[in-house]
Image: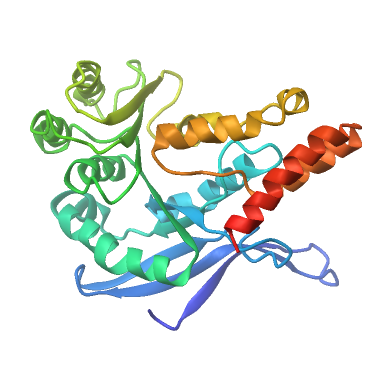
Amino acid sequence: MNNMKHIICLFFLSVCSTWAQTAICIGERFTLPSTIMGGERTIDLYLPPSYNDSSLTPTDYPVVYLLDAQTNFNYFTTLIEKLTQGIPNIPEMIVVGIESTERDNDFTTENDHFWKFVREELKPLVEGKYRCKDFRIAVGHSLGGLSVVDALIKHTDLFNAYIAHDPSLWWGEGYGIKLFEQSKGKDFQNRLLYITHTGYKIRHNGRSGHVATFDKLKAMLTANAFPNLQWKISEYSKENHGTIQLIGNIDMFRALFAEMFIDRNDIEENPQVITERYKALSQRLHYTFTPSEPYLKNTIKWLQRNGKQTQAQEVEALLINFKEKNK
């Protein structure tokens, strides 16, 4: 890895020169030499707030691999962090943003090389240096979404969940649809596919075929042509190609971790609902997820403030169990 590291910060500059400057840092940026891609790649990395919190028991985190980080990293990490706060909708995650300089090649003709780079060069680096769960999510938009679809079919074992926003399935005379047609009957090993697309009132540079491809794909998915593939396709009639990622990421990540949000009133009535919901989540995703230490501590405090000491003690037992498993 290149020794040149940069902290990704947002600066609030005062109008008055006597005011101090305050930096809000959201991650770090580094360059990674790639033999496979034949040059350096710029990587943006986000660690969740609890990662370096010395008051918490060290734990591992799911990892998101985000394409086109040069335009997506800032808003995406903010969105992810918001969804993890308070009563979490999703778990805290590490975000690995891959910047693109030649995306038309990376995500089309050079796509096999790109995912080989992720598998053989980037992933070992990230998982060797940071505390990562063996649960990975790929996120891409437009041609990046097409690339994510390609990865699902050709590199099924690389990620657990694949999220593609308005993917360019039309590219290459329907290359994306052809991939699915050629993969009927393939065992997708309990992977998850989430696709968003714009509505029929939207036309992209006159390519009405763009939206028609999703009807073809949905018909194949509805016919159960792909064993052991969980899927969800959502149409957003009021969004366009440039805005769909915003609401799409919120909705798809909440859908992916649907069981995780638990109303506190339900916990007050029966604290074991936490165990039940996380068990259901783990069964659906075929991966074990447990409630986080910050979430359990916040829940205990809330119960104690509301005079629910017995329920608080039940949640404290879950917290003790969490710490024991993460020693």
Image coords of residue 34 (percent x, y): 26, 73
Q: Quadrant of residue 110?
A: bottom left
Side (left or right) of 178 relative to 200: left
What residue is rendered at 35% in x and 44% in y? 160
Q: Is any atom of residue 11 visible in this view?
A: yes
How many marks the image carries: the answer is 0
**Quadrant location of the C terminus in the rendered image:** bottom right
**Quadrant location of the N terminus in the rendered image:** bottom left
Side (left or right) of 208 relative to 53: left
Image coords of residue 304 (percent x, y): 88, 38
Colour mapping used in the image: rainbow
Residue 196 position (above or below residue 163): above
Side (left or right) of 123 relative to 275: left
Image coords of residue 165 (percent x, y): 36, 35
What residue is rendered at 64% in x and 66% in y? 52
What residue is rendered at 19% in x and 27% in y? 226
Considering every residue shown, the one lying at the far bottom of the view is: 3
Of 143 and 148, the residue lying toward us:
148
Q: Is any atom of residue 247 visible in this view?
A: no
Residue 144 position (above or below residue 122): above
Of 306 and 233, the residue lying toward us:
306
Image coords of residue 205 (percent x, y): 26, 30
Q: Quadrant of residue 177?
A: top left
Side (left or right) of 272 relative to 116: right
What residue is rendered at 53% in x and 53% in y? 74
Residue 178 position (above or below residue 199): below
Of 200 and 289, the residue lying toward us:
289
